[in-house]
Amino acid sequence: MLGLNKNDLTLLLVVAVLTLFAPFILNPFPADSAMAQFNAGYPDLMQRFIIFGIFAIGFNILFGLTGYLSFGHAAFLGVGSYAAVWMFKLLSYNVVPAIGLAIIMAGLFSVLIGYVSLRRSGIYFSILTLAFAQMSFALAYSVLSNPKFNLTNGETGLQVYKNDPQIFHGEGMQDFPHFFGIYMNSTHTMNVGAWSFDFNAGYYLCAIIMIAVFYLSIRIFRSPFGMMLRAIKSNQTRMSYTGLNPRPHTLAAFVISGMYAGLAGGLMAAMDPLAGAERMQWTASGEVVLMTILGGTGTLIGPVLGAGFIKYFENIFSKINDNILHQWFAFLPDGIEDFVVFIIHPFIGKGWHLTLGIMFMLVVIFLPGGLVEGGQRIGKWIKSRGKSDDKTATTEPAE
């Protein structure tokens, strides 16, 4: 079905179900309970899960299959955002042409950067991509914000103004991105007892796109092209000796990966019509590297898990403060309560990076295959326990 084998189809269906039912899955606690702090089912965060999942899926096509580690993919994310906002400024707030231009511009930009960077491999390739990304950031932040040809609006960021052409923006329409009249900020809230669930139009647009690009990534992984990329990662020198030129394949993987990043950038602008140079910084490129490694490099669902994991920590743990901790441990005697809060304080709020760093170290040391390897180990343990129980039951003497 859909050109997939049974395992891949099952994986696609699992991703689709988790994505479409995320408003329920990510809101397990009642809205008025103390544990509601850990709910993540609000539109802005769910959109981030999906968008950065797309970003990580595309990065994994390059890094996971070919082994080429790029530190410059944030440049394509930023190019996609700027292209989308320019489409809003020139035509209308319809997200379809904006996302289309974001993908095209990111693809063209990745051809240019990839053609130069892929002349080298290993650490030299990584440094070249990092250099190009920082050059792009500098251009967007200062050079291209020159009043004579203001393309990026510098540190303020590119946004839509009332005096922009917007040729197809009809009267009476809201000044916000939409999908043929369905506005991205449209949200329906459903209250079920003490629980509250938000269903956002922008999230579901991103979700459907992510399911589609996830399916595309599966087809790439299982295709002859994907096998060629794995051969490049395994032993590029030996592949060259067979008479096959690896450069066209690596360039194609780089461009596809860049177009995924451009799509993510376009979706970011579609959810919030603003593009800034900060999306091109090296920290954004480093973040997608962490997402991919944390989830499982070279796996299909790993980058999605890694993106969700990091964005959850960034948005949930960073909001926990001392007041919330005191509420949680109020049942303890005052002295012990203050001591517990003092111990936990460095790991929450602004210190969420410390918690994430420790967990990343533990994953890299004990689970080199990322979260996917952890899930596989748990699955094997459950199966082994089930088999041992069956053997015990069959060997017990009958009364």
Image (cartoon, rainbow, N blue to C red):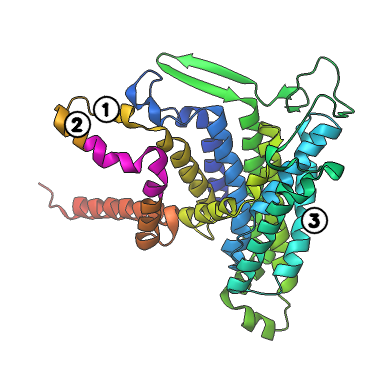
Q: Give 126 or 336, whichever is nearer the viewer.
A: 336
Instruction: Identify residue type, mark 1.
Output: His
Q: Looking at the picture, which amino acid does disc 2 mark?
A: Glu
Looking at the image, the residue that sits furthest to the left is 399
Of the residues under marks 3 and 1, which one precedes in the sequence?
3
* Image location (x, y in percent) of residue 254: 69, 61
Dot 1 or dot 2, earlier in sequence = 1
Mark 2 / mark 3, whichever is N-terminal: 3
- What residue is shown at x 76% (from left), y 43% (from top)? 152
- Mark 1 near mark 2, Cβ–Cβ under 8 Å? yes
Left or right for 114, reference 204: right
At x 48%, y 27%, the residue is 24
Q: Residue furthest bottom?
A: 241
Instruction: Answer whether residue 325 is visible to the viewer in this image.
Output: yes
Residue 337's mark?
Answer: 2
Q: Position of residue 381 (x, y in %)?
A: 31, 54
Q: Which residues are magenta?
A: 340-356
Residue with the mark numbered 1: 326
- Mark 3: which amino acid? Leu
Judged by its main secondary structure, the magenta piece is helix
Q: What residue is rendered at 77% in x and 51% in y?
A: 143
In which quarter of the view is residue 240 placed? bottom right
Numbered circle sitting on residue 108: 3
